[in-house]
Amino acid sequence: AQRVTQPEKLLSVFKGAPVELKCNYSYSGSPELFWYVQYSRQRLQLLLRHISRESIKGFTADLNKGETSFHLKKPFAQEEDSAMYYCALSGRGGTDKLIFGTGTRLQVFP
Amino acid sequence: GAGVSQSPSNKVTEKGKDVELRCDPISGHTALYWYRQSLGQGLEFLIYFQGNSAPDKSGLPSDRFSAERTGGSVSTLTIQRTQQEDSAVYLCASSPDSDTQYFGPGTRLTVL
């Protein structure tokens, strides 16, 4: 079965602390993995995708096929990182439907 | 440029009534998706249109839900005989070939 699991509903850290939002997936084949972010009162937007292997707003995520994980990391959290983060997968090329995890709310305190 | 737009932004209806939700995708995007965001279920895929291909309806929760995409552009999601469990934010997204999905602001549906 296709599934994305985000075990933490809420993650609270202080500004400057490291952050890791966990994501595990189950998929038969080679999925494409994404992190989407939704800031307060804004629309859902792409943060990063594993094939790009880039860092966006200081966030990185490495696809670990052995552990079927795609954890999102940032070494030093900022208050403006407070948002809802969704891990998602798609079957091919990013144009197939997205299967989302239930999301993790990140709160960064000053 | 203009992003994905959805209307109405909010819709309150009575149980048993039909509702129509509209999505205007980004011009030139061939793929269009509908998702539902609810407290209990998170973000769920509903239906996917790609060009002239038959839509992928595998996520529609019941036969009360249907969607059309006219002329390869605007899409309408219709929910017949609404139930309270249909209350959610309905999100539309569009995508060019082989690229990122761009989401609209959503329509918040409340069924009383």
Image (cartoon, coloured by chain):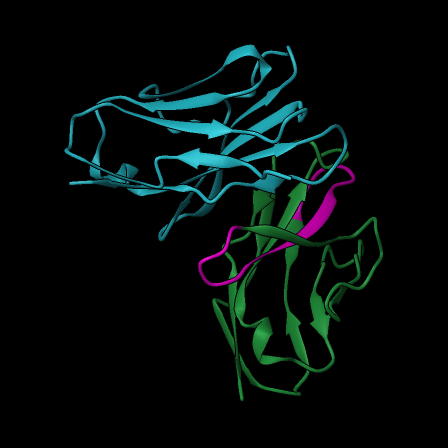
Chain colours: A green, B cyan
Left or right: A73 in relation to B102: right
Give the answer, above or below, for where A103 lies relative to B108: below
Left or right: residue B75 versus residue A67 is left
**Residue A1 visible, this orientation:** no
Front residue of this view, candidates B38 and B89: B89
Quadrant of the rendered image containing residue B111? top left
Location of residue B49 in the rendering, given as x and y in whole percent from the top left corner:
58, 21
Percent position (x, y) of residue A49?
A: 75, 51
Magenta span has A31? yes
Which range is magenta? A26-43
Q: Position of residue A5 (x, y in %)?
A: 57, 55
Q: Residue at x 36, y 51 (%)?
A: B40
Looking at the image, which is closer to me, A57 or A89?
Answer: A57
Classify A51 as above or below B46.
below
| Residue closer to the observer: A3 or A12 | A12
- Looking at the image, residue B50 lies above or below residue B36: above
